Image (cartoon, coloured by chain):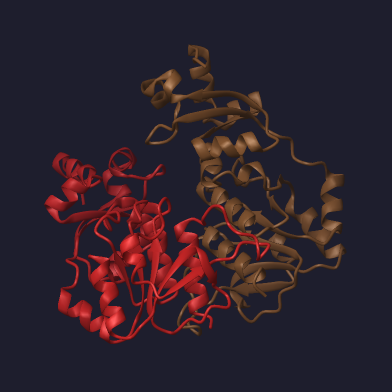
Chain colours: A brown, B red
Amino acid sequence: MKITANEIKLVRSLRQKKFRDETGLFVAEGEKMVREAEDSNFAIINEYHIEEIGEKTMGRISMLSTPSPVLAILEQKPFPGKGDIMKLIESKPICLALDSVRDPGNLGTILRIADWFGMDAVFASPDTCDLYNPKVVQASMGSVFHKLFVRTELAEICSKFTECGMEIYGTYLDGEGLRTAPLSGNGLIVMGSESEGISKDITSYVTRKLLINPYPINSRPTDSLNVAMAAAIVCYEFRNR
Amino acid sequence: MKITANEIKLVRSLRQKKFRDETGLFVAEGEKMVREAEDSNFAIINEYHIEEIGEKTMGRISMLSTPSPVLAILEQKPFPGKGDIMKLIESKPICLALDSVRDPGNLGTILRIADWFGMDAVFASPDTCDLYNPKVVQASMGSVFHKLFVRTELAEICSKFTECGMEIYGTYLDGEGLRTAPLSGNGLIVMGSESEGISKDITSYVTRKLLINPYPINSRPTDSLNVAMAAAIVCYEFRNR
């Protein structure tokens, strides 16, 4: 399919949240990504192939340094309603919660991790970056198409987990060692922002503070790990008990 | 300290490997980074502070979307000589080896991980991206200043580890589960490129193939984890046995 000047303008505008919000659309690039989109229940509005629109035009609409062979415009999906979310939590799942993760690369990577380790959902505070940011979509390597993601007030989510008798875990520099801490097969794992960690409000719900020990094991960390790294290690530990 | 037009040109040129190679210099930005540089044995050529050079000029020389309060030009350090490397390996260390990791964000993140988990050194194949690439420096969060990094032919490194009676580990989609695999306190852990994994040549040295099991644990992965995520999990497991 060819591309019109208006379509070029549309694709480029979707780099901005404002236009993504207005149109309810977003972009995915690359063969693997578009294949995953096709296999998902996301609606594809248009697909542009480099052999049809030419390398130069693809270079103009692509976000990547090397223009992709294919780029698709997709329709965003609404988040599930409150009733469905509460029902999910009542089923005693194991989920991630992201408290103000603002970097799109980190969010995308965390979705990929959540997918790999079979987390049942990823909840994110309202100030977490936009799911449909092209950097999130790319870094997720397709997980954005099949991992349940909900942007919502985390306090509500936390109190529902508590009400259902599950633990709420969080990573802190003064937590107990992850390797030997008791972990259950369900609950909520909260990851904080890189600069500020988990907020005070959400900390009040946390029932178990965890620390990914640096080496040597008794040294106290002065800095924190990148939030996506920390999520990877914590999910690995939960899934290998 | 003020900044001259020539210095502005120099700082900007250091975004390119060619000029970093020619001058033997590189750039680090941000308060934490520059403090870590000051505390290291890297020579600082110049420091530029935003209150002295102004926001506009900092914006011109900064690589970051939000210009840093401080930016420093530093001298690169030569890699250690072969004799020192061989002596290090004879001391039975635990090290990482990176086989063609080309993404600077991944390399920087892996250095941070190697630092957190006290890996004794990071060896990287000649086609691994430049250590002094500004994206590597930033993603390392300062680890570039104190983690031993050597760009070298990995085959030589591998055969020295073998000669010294140590194991060589690598991650593969057909490996045995990391959690239950026997791991020793020393040896070489090879991480491959995201697109191609570990090369055939280096695979011939690997004595133990590992897999970070996805969940459910018996499902076979069709895709691989991001190399920095995989490095984080493998280092965590080695340091928590």
Q: Is residue B119 visible?
A: yes
Of residues A209 and A10, the one drawn nearer to the viewer in this rendering: A10
Residue at 31% x, 63% y is B201
**Residue B224 % position (x, y):** 51, 55
Q: In percent of the image, x 33 and y 65: which residue is there?
A: B202
Q: Position of residue A213 (x, y in %)?
A: 53, 77
Q: Percent from the top left, x then y, of residue A75? A: 66, 29
Q: Is residue B204 left or right of residue B226?
A: left
Residue ID at (40%, 53%): B196
Give the side of residue B215 with respect to residue B53, left or right.
right
Q: Is residue B30 visible?
A: no
Residue A199 in picture, x, y percent from top left:
65, 60
Name the foreground residue: B203 vs A113. Answer: B203
Looking at the image, residue B91 lies above or below residue B61: below
Q: Nearer the viewer, residue A191 or A29?
A: A29
Residue shown at the point (53%, 37%) measured from the top left: A134
Number of dots carrying numbers: 0
Q: Is residue B162 above or below residue A145?
A: below
Q: Nearer the viewer, residue A214 or A139?
A: A139
Q: Quadrant of residue B128?
A: bottom left
Of the 4 image quadrants, the one containing the C terminus of chain A is bottom right
